[in-house]
Amino acid sequence: MKNILFAFVFIGLSVSAFAQSGPPAGDAKVGEFYGQDVSAKAVKKAISTDELNKELKSTPKIAKTSVKGKVTGVCPKKGCWVSLATDSGETFFVKMKDYAFFVPTALEGKTVVLEGSAESKTTSVKELQHYAEDAKKTQAEIDAIKEPKTETRFLASAIKVVE
C-alpha cells in the first residue's frame, strides 16, 4: 500500500514538474533558434511565403524547404503555433513538428526562417474555431467562422530568428 501511494505521489509530482502552463519565456533575439538550428545555407536559400504558395499550386506537398517571413501571431496558450504574414495579405499557419518544441510570444513581430515541410490543406470549421479560441478571439469572432478554409500549412522542425 505504501509503495502504491509513493508511486502516485511520484507520478503526480513528475507530471506537474513537466507540465507547461504557457509559452516558454524568452526574448526571441536574432540568432536564437527553436527546435533544431537552421543552417546558414538554409537561411540563404529561404524563399518567401508567397513563393512557397506559388510552388504549392503545382505540387500539393513539399517535403523539405526553408521559408522566411514575419511572425504575426503566436499561440498564447503554449507557443505551439505561429502565423506569418504574406505579401498578399493571407496568413500562413505554422505548427511545430511532433509538438517537439514551443516558441515564446516575444517571437511576434520578428522575422524568422523556418525549416520543414509544407502543404496546401483545407482546415475544418471546428479546427479554425479551436485556433481562434487559442488566439483569445471573442465569442462573436469564433461564431463567425462558418466555412472551412484552404490555406498553406507548414510543419516546422526548426525556427530561427533572423531580424
Image: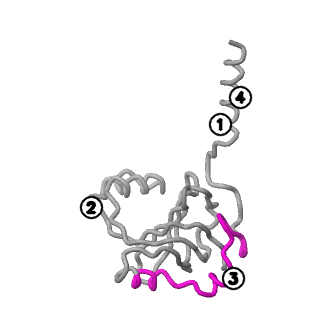
What crowding class fits label 1: few (fewer than 14 Cα within 10 Å), some (14-19), or many (20 or more)? few
Residue annotated with mark 1? 15
Magenta-colored stretch includes residue 32: yes
User: Distance between the Cα atoms at labels 1 and 2?
Assistant: 38 Å
Disc 3, SS: helix
- The structure residue drawn at horizontal position 68% and vertical position 78%, both measured from the top left corner, is 39
Type of amino acid under label 2: Glu
Q: Indicate which label's residue lies in the foreground, 1 or 2.
A: 1
Q: How is the image coloured?
A: one colour
Type of amino acid under label 4: Phe
User: Distance between the Cα atoms at labels 4 and 3?
Assistant: 43 Å
User: Distance between the Cα atoms at labels 3 and 2?
Assistant: 40 Å
What crowding class fits label 2: few (fewer than 14 Cα within 10 Å), some (14-19), or many (20 or more)? few
155 or 105, which is in the foreground?
Answer: 155
- The structure residue drawn at horizontal position 72% and vertical position 70%, both measured from the top left corner, is 32
Residue annotated with mark 3? 40
Type of amino acid under label 3: Ala
What crowding class fits label 4: few (fewer than 14 Cα within 10 Å), some (14-19), or many (20 or more)? few
- Cβ–Cβ under 8 Å for marks 1 and 4: no
Residue annotated with mark 2? 147
Is the residue 10 above or below the residue 73 in the image? above
- Quarter of the image for residue 21 reads top right
Relative side of 161 to 63, left or right: right
Q: Earlier in the sequence, mark 1 or mark 3?
A: 1
64 or 73, which is in the foreground?
Answer: 64
Q: Earlier in the sequence, mark 3 or mark 2?
A: 3
Q: Earlier in the sequence, mark 4 or mark 3?
A: 4
User: Distance between the Cα atoms at labels 1 and 4?
Assistant: 9 Å
Extreme residue toward the front, this view: 63
Q: Position of residue 124 (x, y in %)?
A: 32, 58
Residue annotated with mark 4? 10
What crowding class fits label 3: few (fewer than 14 Cα within 10 Å), some (14-19), or many (20 or more)? few
